Image: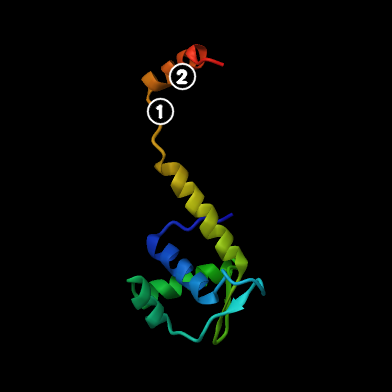
Amino acid sequence: MAGLFNSSEKRLARILLLMAEFSKPGEPEMLIPKISQETLADMIGTTRSRVSFFMNRFRKLGFVEYNGRIRVHKSLLNVILHDHLQDHNAERPALSTTARAAMPKLKKNRPD
């Protein structure tokens, strides 16, 4: 599964998902209201050319279709959720060598 590496790319994906209203039950793919790349760029704080680049990437990866209006596929939501989990796990501090060495001792001394 392809990850999204750029924060602007992640923001664009989130905006598209919000506009597609994936929180509502129903169709797995939704058309979003007509919107320009310039407006999307303003919403996520980047340039229109970057939005164009990301949208082409999303299309090639099968996350969106567009021909006048944008259809967002649920696969984009899956990527965002997967990416969020990876980010969350990356933020967890690693145990130091001292803490790892103490773990077996803590297990032995723990009352059952």
Question: Where does label 1 land, which residue?
Answer: 95
The amino acid sitting under disc 1 is Leu
State the residue in front, 62 or 30: 30
Task: Mark 2 and mark 1 in contact? Answer it, CB < 8 Å.
Answer: yes
Quarter of the image with the N terminus is: bottom right
Place of residue 59 in the rendered image (x, y in percent of width and height, measured from the top left): 56, 71
Helix, strand, or loop for circle 2? helix
State the residue in front, 21 or 62: 21
Question: Where does label 2 land, which residue?
Answer: 103
Q: Which residue is drawn at the image coordinates 39% and 71% (left, top)? A: 50
Badge 1: how crowded within 10 Å, few (<14), some, or many (20+)?
few
Quarter of the image with the C terminus is: top right
The amino acid sitting under disc 2 is Met
Place of residue 53 in the rendered image (x, y in percent of width and height, measured from the top left): 44, 71
Q: Which residue is drawn at the image coordinates 43% and 21% (left, top)? A: 100
Lateral position of residue 11 relative to residue 68, left or right: left
Helix, strand, or loop for circle 1? loop
Please, which residue is most extreme toward the right here? 27
